[in-house]
Image (spheres, helix red, strand yellow):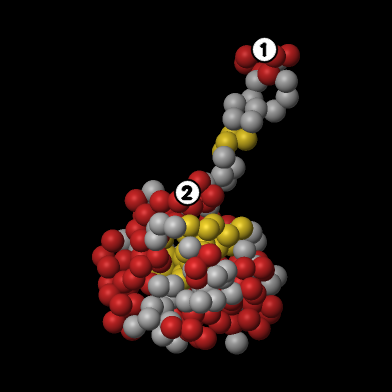
Amino acid sequence: MLLDASECQLVLVDYQERLMPVIHDASATLANALRLARLAQLMDVPVWGTEQNPSRLGPNDAQLRALCRDTLAKMHFSAAEEGLGEWLRPPAKPPAGNARSLPKHLQKTAQQAPERNAIVIAGCEAHVCLLQTALGLLEDEFEVWVVTDACSSRTERNRDAAYDRLAGAGAELVTTEMVAFEWLASCENPVFREALALIK
């Protein structure tokens, strides 16, 4: 199964200023997160951020934060425990028109906005907040795609253990370029040249 941009949302977990200096391969990890967020904007994919205990760990990288629709401040390691699922599932739209003035058979029922159930997720630390958030989203019946080259931990061992566990739980492991080219689907996509410039 391939990713479809129209069915996706992007979640970027805890790229915080006081955390990133101790993260393994932090500059490449953050560069890929920024690339993902810019690609998402090009293709109208909603981008959300999370920050773990921001009063202690500071905000997310400023460039990354600016690319997010909103950022969830959290104390639980899992953003799913703090209501991320409600952000990712649109609320039902209220019925149109004045319900009192219409006979029941003409009243429109509340409609869900189209769901974007495929969650592309990346972040730090892979074995703590990223892992727990991804597992929580799987429990909430989202499809979860973990972008491995945009995730890291303080040690490679912890990062790799997170990938093993996530794959075993049903998450798909992908890379930034896999996401980009699956979202594009074709070299005839109108934003192909702009996206290619971000990839290269």
User: Could you tell me which residue is drawn at 28 percent across and 61 percent down?
Assistant: 169
Amino acid type of disc 2?
Gly
Residue 165 picture quarter: bottom left
Where does the image place residue 145, in percent across and percent down from the top left? Answer: 42, 65
- In the picture of the structure, the residue carrying the numbered disc 2 is 83
Amino acid type of disc 1?
Pro
Where does the image place residue 183, in percent across and percent down from the top left? Answer: 56, 68
Secondary structure state at the residue bearing disc 1: loop
Of residues 135 and 77, the one drawn nearer to the viewer in this rendering: 77
Q: Is residue 148 above or below residue 111?
A: below
Where does the image place residue 121, in percent across and percent down from the top left? Answer: 46, 65
Neighbours of disc 1 within 10 Å: few (<14), some (14-19), many (20+): few
Residue 22 picture quarter: bottom left
How far is the residue under mark 1 from the one under mark 2? 37 Å
Give the mark, 1 or 2, whose residue is nearer the N terminus: 2
Residue 181 visible (yes or no)? no
- In the picture of the structure, the residue carrying the numbered disc 1 is 103
User: Could you tell me which residue is drawn at 46 percent across and 71 percent down?
Assistant: 123
Neighbours of disc 2 within 10 Å: few (<14), some (14-19), many (20+): few
Secondary structure state at the residue bearing disc 2: loop
User: Could you tell me which residue is drawn at 52 percent across and 51 percent down?
Assistant: 88
In the picture, which quadrant includes the N terminus? bottom left
Is 140 on the left-hand or right-hand side of 183? left
Where does the image place residue 77, in percent across and percent down from the top left? Answer: 39, 61
Of residues 9 and 151, the one drawn nearer to the viewer in this rendering: 151
User: Could you tell me which residue is drawn at 59 percent across and 82 percent down?
Assistant: 199
In the picture, which quadrant includes the C terminus? bottom right
Of residues 152 and 120, the one drawn nearer to the viewer in this rendering: 152
